[in-house]
């Protein structure tokens, strides 16, 4: 059976994914590997979709790392950190 085609990379929330990477890296002190992120999104999103979303964020220079599974090392670029900060400030000002 093919994966559920309704689940696409665009359905993975960018801010949530950035937050997860930062949380795993800073709070859990992990060298964030693609498997950690695939596991987090399982079973809602198939690994292929998680990888596509990470590739998308790499293309936008929001994160650093490698999606092929050879190593860990996902982290936010300063561009990614700024986007996350902006979003958190927006949430604060809505309260
Ligand atoms: Zn690699």
Image (cartoon, helix red, strand yellow):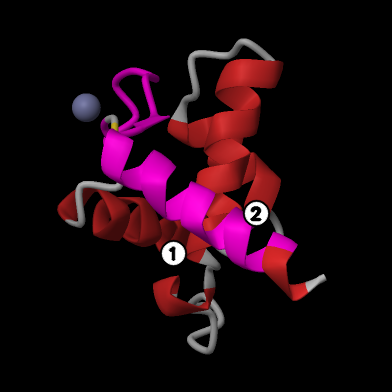
Q: 53 above or below 34?
A: below
Residue 32 seen in this snapshot: yes
Q: Residues within 10 Å of mark 2 (few under 14, many from 20)?
A: some
Q: Is residue 94 magenta?
A: no
Q: Quadrant of residue 64?
A: top left
State the image coordinates of residue 5 (x, y, percent, origin top left): 48, 86
Q: Is residue 67 visible?
A: no
Residue 51: give x, y in percent of width and height. Answer: 38, 52
Is 83 magenta? The answer is yes
Q: Position of residue 91 (x, y in %)?
A: 69, 65
Q: Are marks 1 and 2 in contact (CB under 8 Å)?
A: yes
Residue 82 higher or lower than 59, as above or below? above
How far apart are labels 1 and 2 at the CA level?
10 Å
Q: Quadrant of residue 15?
A: bottom right
State the mark number for residue 30: none
Quadrant for the N terminus in the image: bottom right
* Mark 1 surroundings within 10 Å by alpha-carbon count, few (fewer than 14), some (14 through 19), many (20 or more): many
How many marks the image carries: the answer is 2
Q: Is residue 65 left or right of residue 72?
A: left
Give the labeled residue for mark 2: 41
Question: Which range of residues does the magenta coloring cover?
Answer: 66-92
Q: Please tell me in which quarter of the rendered image ligand 1 is found.
A: top left
Residue at 50% over, 50% down: 84
**Which residue is rendered at x = 52% and y = 75% of the image?**
3
Q: Is mark 2 within 8 Å of ligand 1?
A: no
Q: Residue at x 70, y 67 (%)?
A: 93
Note whether 16 is above or below 26 in the view shown.
Answer: below
| Left or right of 52, for residue 31 | right
Report x, y in % for residue 58: 23, 47
Residue 53 placement, left or right of 46: left
5 vs 94, nearest the viewer: 94
Residue 49 image label: 1
């Amino acid at each position: 059976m093919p994966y559920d085609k309704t689940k696409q990379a665009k359905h993975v929330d960018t801010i949530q994914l950035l937050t997860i990477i930062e949380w795993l890296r800073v709070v859990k002190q992990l060298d964030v590997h693609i498997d950690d992120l695939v596991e987090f999104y399982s079973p809602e999103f198939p690994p292929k979709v998680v990888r596509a979303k990470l590739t998308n964020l790499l293309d936008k220079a929001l994160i650093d790392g490698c999606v092929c599974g050879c190593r860990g090392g996902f982290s936010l670029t300063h561009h990614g950190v700024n986007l996350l900060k902006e979003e958190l400030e927006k949430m604060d000002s809505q309260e």
